[in-house]
Amino acid sequence: MRWYKAMNNITSDPALHLVAEKSKCYRHEVIAFWILLLEKASQKNDNGIIDEIDFEETDFTLGLLSGKSQTIFKALVERGKIIDFTIKNWAKHQADTSNAERQRKFRDKKKANESNDDVTLRNVTVTQNNAVTLEEKRREEIRIDKEVSKIELFPLWLDLVLWQDFVNHRKAIKAPLTKKAEDLAMGALLKLIEKGYSQQELIENTILNGWKTFYEPKTNQQHKGNGHGTQQTKQSLSEQARNVLQRI
């Protein structure tokens, strides 16, 4: 058994309705006979050729009165639906019915797309000092967009240069920051900054000691002053925020 394509308007095809009127047969009889012809054509070959028709047998198969199938056939020929015992436009409507053919076209299309991609990668935008491929330029734009998005997520008081040093440090000790770990580390850093410590000292101290997070330095008397830690912290955070904004 094999599949064949059929139009989705067989029952409402005006041409078949005219054939029914011309042959003085019922529409369902013409439609049934037409489908039978399509089946025969698909069983024989890929060209839509109807080799032989036993009209007597066909009348019996479809439950038609004797001679009706031959009358309908003649009307189909007159309407141009059948030409030289061949279904009109059969090859056009049955194109790509085989899986092998579809696979071949898919491979050709894929190869063409890969070729176009290769041409795109070879196109270059010439600048004053070098030539940057369009693909590299696109990747660079995406990277910049991502970096900008990351910056917008960080608080203003955080020195991004120092923080990146800490991130690189975590990677170097094979303990890269997860989102949760980053939030916890940032919280620990902020608590110490609020006590009057500078984030540069805290981050550098953590890196030098190979720690995963931030700890209060042991010699802390010089940082706490005369009980004015809160006021100094506010000033420190403000100054650090201004410094960060100046770097952006």
Image (spheres, rainbow, N blue to C red):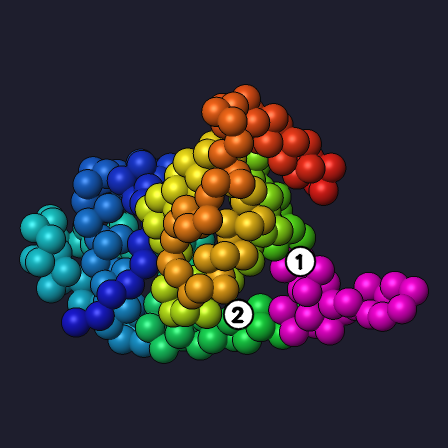
Residue 3's tag is none
State the residue in front, 59 or 141.
141
| Mark 1 closeness class: few <14, some 14–19, many ≥20 residues within 10 Å | few
Residue 5 in the image, given as x and y percentages of width and height: 32, 59
Q: Which residue is mark 1?
A: 140
Q: Quadrant of residue 118?
A: bottom right
The amino acid type found where label 1 is placed reads Glu
Q: Please tell me whether residue 136 belongs to the stretch shown in magenta.
A: yes
The correct choice, above or below, for 110 with respect to 170 in the image is: below
Answer with left or right where residue 243 lies relative to residue 109. Answer: right
Q: Which residue is mark 2?
A: 109
Residue 228 in the image, given as x and y percentages of width and height: 52, 23
Q: Of label 2 and label 1, which has the lower sequence position?
A: 2
| Mark 2 closeness class: few <14, some 14–19, many ≥20 residues within 10 Å | few
State the residue in front, 100 or 111.
111
Q: Quadrant of residue 136?
A: bottom right
Give the distance between the C-alpha atoms of the residues marked 2 and 1, in whole angstroms.
29 Å
Which stretch appears magenta? Answer: 117-139
Residue 6 in the image, given as x and y percentages of width and height: 31, 54
SS at badge 2: helix
The correct choice, above or below, for 78 with respect to 19 in the image is: below
**Residue 243 visible at all:** yes
SS at badge 1: helix
